[in-house]
Image (cartoon, coloured by chain):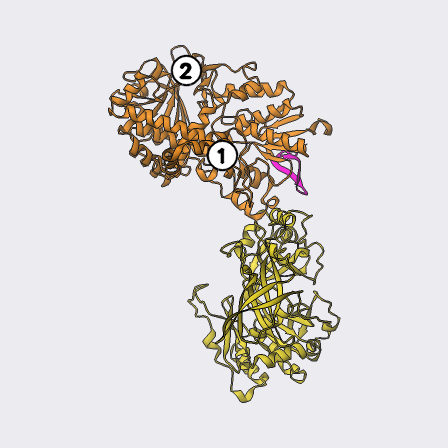
Chain colours: A yellow, B orange
Amino acid sequence: MTEINLDDKDETEIVQLSPLDGMGTAPDPAWFEQPANELPFERYVLTTPLHLVAATESRTNQWTEWNGYTLANVYTTVEQEYDALRTRAALSDISPLVKYRISGKDAAIYLDRLLTQSVAGVAVNQVARAVLCAGDGCIVTEGLLFRLGETDFRLVVRSPHLDWMLDSAEDFEVGVEDVSGTIAAMSLCGPLAEAVLEAVGIEQANSLEKAQAVWVELGGMPVYVSRTGMMGGSEFELWADPDDAPIVWRRLLDAGRTFGLLPVGMAVRNVARLENGIALEGIDYQSGFSAPDLSTACSPFDLGQGDRVSLERSLFNGQKALTAIAKRGSRHAMKGIEVDASPGVRIEAIFVGDRKVGRVTSHAWSPRLQHHIALALIETDALGASSGFTVEVNEEGEGCKRLAVKLEKRPFLEFS
Amino acid sequence: MSEDALQYDAIVIGAGHNGLVTAGYLARAGKKVVVLEASSAIGGAARTGEISPDYQVSTGAHLISCLPKKVERDLKLAKHGLVWATRDVATVALDQGGKHVIIPAGGKKDIATLTAHATRDGDAWRRFDAQMKKFISVIGPFLEGPVPEMGPDLPGRVPVTTALRLEKLGPRDLRAFLRFMPSSIARILDATFEGDLVKGALALDATLGHHSGPKTPGTAFSFLYKRALETLGQGTGYPAGGAGALSDALAASAESTGARIRLDSPVAQIIAGAGKVSGVRLEDGTVFEAPLVMSSADPKTTCLDLLGARHFEAPMAKHIGRIRSQGSAAKINLALEGLPTFENFTDREYGGRLLIAPDMATVERSFIAAKRNELTLDPVMEMVIPSYHDPRLAPMGHHVLSIVVPNVPFDVEGGWDARRDEFVKRVIDTIALYAPDVSNKIIAGEILTPPEIEEKLGLKGGHWHQGDMSFDQLLAFRPAPGMANYATPVEGLYLCGAGTHPGGGLTGLPGKYAADTALLKEKIS
């Protein structure tokens, strides 16, 4: 449960920091405060620690939802935000990510059993991709694993699975704790992201390698900066205390103004991650636990992420099933497609001839490519044909039509 | 002892009858085997003890009805001292008025005991019995070997004989079969018989040893499964010297082929690394090494306590943790100075298996009481007077009475220490309704409540069969889904106790099939 702990003093500070003085003051924090007698999980609409500062940036009042949290969908316009993200710098609130702290003597071997890859090679302050599989080899959820210390890890995933983590913890001397409410997260990406960080005084960003993280201090506030993200290009993620996060946000926006930094909502982030060819749990495929049937769940192999599974090692959840899948091959595979259609169409099924061989799981108009790009889950036996695919396109007022498509390699965009 | 002496080809954990069977088969295949038993006596639940000096009785299980001829012959049990006191124990449903019913009703005379209560039950029995035999022919093939594993893709290969026999049943019997399988035994019996006594006795048979009542769905299958197991045996009976004599013969057989049995050797840990088993460590720190470890301890103890959940994928560990193994039966053994007097009893009845279950409602009531951690007011039970066929168990003219009381809670309200005497009194008072002089003849007695069965016989949860034998925990799901083939995910570690297919009941089959599986796997690799 997120708490907004901005007492009066902090609030004035924030107002002073605000570049938007002319727009009036921030909303009264008391509106978002949790009543004292509220039970845990009683509230269905949650706000992130960055909600107030994000709200002051919104010109459209367009919001969306992720894990129960309210997030800006569009702050200004999609075009402006996209432009900032791809040519300058973009700042987004990604606090709804679920964060677990895993610590204790057996933390590393516990994670070895939980994840599809061994954590042995992950050094302190290094970040690894983390994939959690169920017993049937389907992905439960995925995300990032941060090694904070020898026996201290932070697992950041897309959806909450504490019960699964605790079930898996039996027989291990390990503490598993949901620390989502105690960490706020921001994503800073774009070609000028590094410059923005430097401008606020985070020089270490320069020397940060991909998939590495570092503790920095920003005006006395500890911030964990990692070179991670899924938009492609130069990108960072900043992890801070919920009390500090709004101030960090304001500092970044202030310092970034000269670089053209803009806050960017979920709509553009969705386009950008599609351009980068990333399939997401909960959007493109369902978690192995919530999928109504196997056709909506995916194994790492289905996503083309076989390199994230090391089968030849000590036991891990899903090993037996994944070994079998690796041997027999996937049932379906996630593929990228490009569709030559105008913006604002709906794309659903994918066909070979008259046979439906898959469905489009998400698609978007890419301003950079001037194309519709999409991810589609396609039956493997249909993939033998390299051409002949068509998709059903629904255009407002025009009805349904079939368009020929080509399978494209992912990511759609190349980044230097 | 030198280090070298502690290296074996195979280690068997537990010297219960299944552990000994496994040891016997492995030793016969030329393996150097050691059996590690935690207590200071072999036998597990199949042992003979003394109630008081000179009065001997089977401490736990007291009847053997499903021991296959193959096991007896393979292990040459007769040569190693197994002598049957009787192999023809009839089931007698006791009636307070002396009109006892004999089941299974074979001849005309037995049928007459049924018709004495309800004229149409004689014909009903013939039909019922014939139908059961047909149904048994369908599920029987599953018991004759390890159950095919159900893979994630295969719907499980069904034995060909079963498929053929299912087809041969014909539409009428097939429909009856499909309705029968998920039913409660109460529904089946109510639709078949009229007499309360026969219904009560068969209902008790279906639920004995399981945590269920006659109205529990699935008990019809439990009944069928038990009857199917019995067809593998050679008639219900017991050896001279009690159930312990079977264990003694099994131990002698195993030792004759070179197996070593080590008592007072409680295993603290199964040592495994890199997905392979390498041996076991005893509580005193002694390490035994072997590439093959067969555990006849119950699946939960073996997998979660001795090995540890970390050696399993989390869903599998969860499945194992969820095995229902709450014991629900108590054992009472009495030493009597003479035969208790039952009305209208002949030789056959005295030597029989005596059931007190006047009707299904009484059986169901006792289950409901157990569910609520209470003691029922009118207990149901299964009794045997083993000294009738085996006089050496007691001094001349004296007898021992062995009683299994089902539907007894593990955690009784108020605690067993406070309620033990009350419970024994209720049981004896109930017997006295049929044999009024029984209380005057008691010289000594002992009782094993479910917690004591757990402690003394080494059965976790005090469950006789190391886990309820209900549809969801049998066949491809015994002991847990995905583990039906005795092997565990740790290479070289096998389960061989009653917790595995085909389950409990002194069959020796889990032990045999586990040994077969381990030997076969070794041959293949």
Position in image of residue A105 (x %, y %): 64, 52
As helix, strand or loop, the secondary structure at mark 2 comes to: helix
Q: Point out the stretch of residues depicted in magenta.
A: B268-286
Question: Pointer 2: what residue?
Answer: B387
- Relative depth, front residue between B474 and A144: B474
Q: From the top left corner, tell me how far across and down residue B104 is, in percent.
A: 36, 22
Q: Residue at the location (47% across, 28% down)?
A: B505
Q: Can residue A328 be seen in this snapshot?
A: yes
Numbered label attached to residue A105: none
Q: Nearer the viewer, mark 2 or mark 1?
A: 1
Q: Which of the two residues, A255 or B207, is positioned nearer the viewer here?
A: B207
Residue B273 falls within the magenta-colored stretch: yes
**Which quadrant of the rendered structure holds the N terminus of chain B?**
top right
Disc 1 residue crowd, few under 14, some 14–19, many 20+, Cα 10 Å? many
Q: Position of residue B157 (x, y in %)?
A: 53, 38
Work out whether disc 2 and disc 1 sit on a shared chain: yes
Whichever of labels 2 and 1 marks the residue nearer the N terminus, that label is: 2
Residue B56 point in image, percent of width and height: 45, 18
Give, as a three-letter code, the residue at label 1.
Gln
Q: In the rendered structure, which amino acid carries the disc numbered 2?
A: Ser
User: What SS does tag 1 mark?
Assistant: loop
Q: Image height check: is B191 above or below B258?
A: below
Q: Mark 1 = which residue?
A: B466
Residue positioned most to the front:
A353
Residue B156 vertical position relative to residue A138 in the rendered view, above or below: above
Residue B428 visible in the picture: no
The chain ID associated with circle 2 is B
Q: Nearer the viewer, residue A342 or A76?
A: A342
